[in-house]
Image (tube, helix red, strand yellow):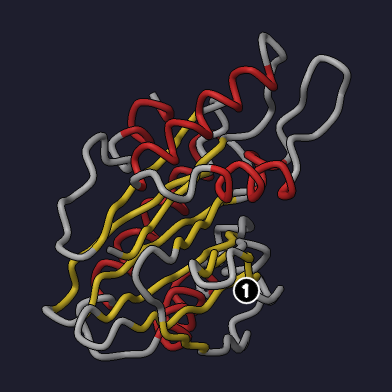
Amino acid sequence: MAVKIQERYHPKLLPAIPGLSLGHYYNTAGVCGDFFDIVPSRKDRISFVLADVAGKGMNSLLIMTMLRSILRLVLNTTHTASTILSWANRGISTEKTIDHFASIALILYNSLDNTIQYANAGTSPIYLLRNKTEEFECLSKNSEPIGVEKTSVYSDNSTKVEKNDIIITFTDGLIEALDANGNQYTTTRLTSLVKRNKDLTGKEIANKIKEDMKRFSGDTKQHDDQTLLVIKIL
């Protein structure tokens, strides 16, 4: 049941957003820890959320549901990315019956000036491939996960993005996926694959990653959900 409910939080069709080419990859291991959301918050803001809730089953699903509800309420305001994460953190931290926590990557895209504002909680990574340099930048910094300390502080960052820049964010289940010999997929393999396919659409890049993950893992049982978002600037 938990897996079926979780799947409702993973859009099968991504919204068509002018100026962006989107792609995603999701593979569940039955852990019920990952979810992502894309919210056209205002005419000048598109919000992208990727979250990885620690734990398994119904308890993780409860946190996921609470987080998604809190975030959807706050994303429609004028608050910054860090303030939005702080609100979510207070909402989860004050629930005494819950001992789970979550890593979140939050990206707010402003279509009017082609900037992204971003913040992260925990270890959820955000990478930006600059078209001009053809090099990846790691934008995120490790911080306290959501739900650990009510007083956790998150920082805002922003950067200009240009045509054909590519943003990716993903959960650790993807880069820690194992092959038959126990080797991990790794961030290096992922970013190298994106570089080689940077001229494709966001959807096509995500499909390339899906195919590569299948080749890499084969029939090896995975122990964590795998989720990825690709955002390409047009």
Q: Where is residue 47 in the image (x, y as percent from the top left)?
A: 30, 69
Q: Which residue is depicted at the point 33% across and 65% down?
A: 233
Vertical position of residue 62 compared to residue 115: above or below: above
Q: In which quarter of the image is the C terminus?
A: bottom left
Q: In which quarter of the image is residue 163?
A: bottom left
Q: Which residue is depicted at the point 41% across and 71% down?
A: 107
Q: Position of residue 51 (x, y in %)?
A: 49, 56
Task: Give the amino acid at mark 1.
Answer: Ser
Q: Which residue is depicted at the point 26% across and 61% down?
A: 20
Vertical position of residue 39 compared to residue 58: above or below: below
Q: Camera-side residue: 176 or 208?
A: 208
Q: Camera-side residue: 32 or 150?
A: 32
Q: Camera-side residue: 60 or 13?
A: 13
**How many labels, in total?**
1
Q: In which quarter of the image is residue 11?
A: top left
Q: In which quarter of the image is residue 99?
A: bottom right
Left-right relation of 141 to 103 = right
Helix, strand or loop at mark 1: loop
Identify residue for label 1: 140
Q: In which quarter of the image is the N terminus?
A: top left
Left-right relation of 64 to 77 = right
Neighbor class of circle 1 (other Cα within 10 Å; few <14, some 14-19, many 20+) is many
Q: Camera-side residue: 192 or 80?
A: 192
